[in-house]
Image (cartoon, rainbow, N blue to C red):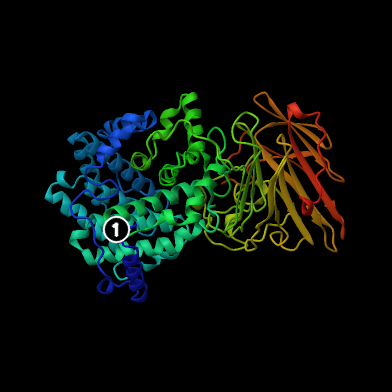
Amino acid sequence: MRNKLGFLILLTCLSMNNGTAAETAEVKVVSGHPRIMMLAGEEKSIRDKVASDSFLAQAHESILMTSEKMLSYPQLESVKTGKRLLEVSRKALKQIYYLSYSYRMTGDVRFADQAEKVMLQVCSFSDWNPSHFLDVAEMTAAVSIGYDWLYDRLSETSRSIIRKAILEKGLYESLPEKTDSPANLHWLDKKNNWNAVCNMGMACGAVAIYEDCPELASEIILRSVKSAKENTLREYWPDGNYPEGYMYWNYGTNFLVMLADIVEKATDLDFGLEDDPAFMRSGDYMVHMTTQGFGCFDYSDCNVKENKLCLPLFWMASVRNDRSLLYGEAGRIEYLQNIGKGESLFTFRLLPSLLIWAPENCIGSNTAPAERLFVGQGETPVALLRNHFGGEDEIFVGLKGGACENGHSHMDIGSFVMYRGRHQWFKDLGYQDYNSLEKEGLDLFRKAQDSPRWQPFRIGMYSHNLIVFDDSLQRIKPRAEITSFGDRDGFVYAATDLTEVQGGLVESYRRGVAIVDDCYAAVRDEIRTQDKDVRIRWAALTPASVEILDDMTALLTIRGDSLYVKVEGKGVKLETYSTDPPHYYDMPNPGTVMLGFSMTLERNTSHDFNVYMIPAEYRELKTAQMKDIDTW
């Protein structure tokens, strides 16, 4: 750790003086270029890893082959999709990062020349769309990496154009006194992925052009570190689970680790990610969130198709010297290679970071985690249960708590999912592209009980694995914690209290999930009504074919494998509900159906419902009737 005391003094000065450039102490930055993430001479360590690790060799060769194709890519244009330029910024980041990496690793000037062309293209844009600051951040990072890594290859004319764009289209737009729209800087105080991405982009730009404006660069570097540590880093507290779920952990954490890497390699500051126990524990959260095949517990705005390799896990595995953190990644790699889609692993725009961060021999004999239960509280509490890791008989159950008003949340508090092996028997539909909804006039970011956000089928209550009371929406502010959990022989469990989330429609409501005898899963709901009748619908979404055998039993089938669903509870009559989109703007949901039951619960009564999910080979097994959650 370098100069930690000095760093704390600088942060104190910045905080006391409101971060003005004249009052900010100057940060010491490594002289010369390159200095962003991969210092001069570090190419050798990457070549050594590539030579000794077949997986990293594949990633390296994929970057080189893709860079060859990029030599003939069409020119990037400043064309927005809805209100976002983000797609263009991401294309620029991928092209410049790949091409610059390929030049540094091979010395082939074609790659450097093409990266220079791309940089000049995007620097000619009138702006980088500061009204949606992620666009500015990723574009600034792209151009800054290229400027730094190719510095000695760039003409002085190109350097001047690129420096000016980094300064005026990037850094100035992040300063209240320089930008025309200070309202665009809401990310400085946000805790979500925006904070990490935007701070990384600005710090990257500041490090790249440090010599030309050392005071301003120092201010921005210190501000980025302070803002990220006070906001982004706290998102992982106290247990490592990430409020916005799997996909956004990958997005935000990639940029947070890049920010720390840039700061610690290029300056005299110590970011100290490895000293934050909650952040380092988030690696375990992601391992437990990952399921077989290419799946995950896809709550909130999660697009499973976008679940690339989790590059920060390679950084964490190296820092912690713990290859079990790569257990899930190894499984993904093996799965995709076995089905002939191994190349899809290597399409991520930040792929060169893998070669920088990964330990040698990173994929191979990766042992499974020792724990089979992960529980995290924090902003979005979650419980992740297994009977064991790996194998066709592995059972995974996830239970989500939290509050609907959290970033990227759906109205899914108390929802569960269930996998066995590679089959996901009960699932979440996941993400719908925001632009497809925004162009229809829906404001998805107004956090209110009557917000249009809750209207789309995939975001609202009716597509999630929940009980709906009196067709009423969940309350957006109450937060459900994981109230109890444990792991003992033959019983892994977790439970949550959903009474307040339901808005006082019932006296009390608790839900528990469990894996019993290592062979089947169960969901238990305990409800006490108030002095009025209440109508309920218990439903869970499945991609399986469903055959209802009797009022309390259903047979689910996926590609020849079967699962029995058995229900205990007074008045239950199983039925199915359609997942056809109720609105013209909703995405279709082919191959899915909801299984459940509806009934009216009388006033001042107690009701218990147990739903067992039993693999076909255990169909004759006598299930142990689930007892009160208090006794678990």
Q: Nearer the viewer, residue 172 or 415?
A: 415
Q: Is residue 6 visible?
A: yes
Look at 30% across and 71% down and name the residue there: 177
The location of residue 421, given as percent across then percent down, is: 62, 31
Question: Residue flagged by tag 1: what amino acid is it?
Answer: Gly
Q: Nearer the viewer, residue 209 or 474?
A: 209
Say which quarter of the image contains residue 484. bottom right
Look at 70% across and 42% down and name the residue there: 540
Q: Is residue 238 left or right of residue 563?
A: left
The location of residue 303, given as percent across then percent down, is: 52, 43
Q: Is residue 389 left or right of residue 526?
A: left
Say which quarter of the image contains residue 173. bottom left
Q: Is residue 349 left or right of residue 295?
A: left
Say which quarter of the image contains residue 373. top right
Q: How many marks?
A: 1
Look at 74% across and 55% down and name the residue there: 510
The answer to whether 131 is drawn above or below residue 116 in the figure is below
The location of residue 296, given as percent across then percent down, is: 56, 40
Q: Is residue 302 visible?
A: no
Q: Nearer the viewer, residue 590 or 512?
A: 512
Quadrant the N terminus occupies: bottom left
* The residue positioned farthest toward the bottom in the image shown: 16
Residue picked out by circle 1? 170
The location of residue 300, given as percent across then percent down, is: 57, 50
Q: Residues within 10 Å of mark 1 (few under 14, many from 20)?
A: many
The answer to whether 355 is drawn above or below residue 81 in the figure is above
Disc 1 is placed on an element classified as: helix
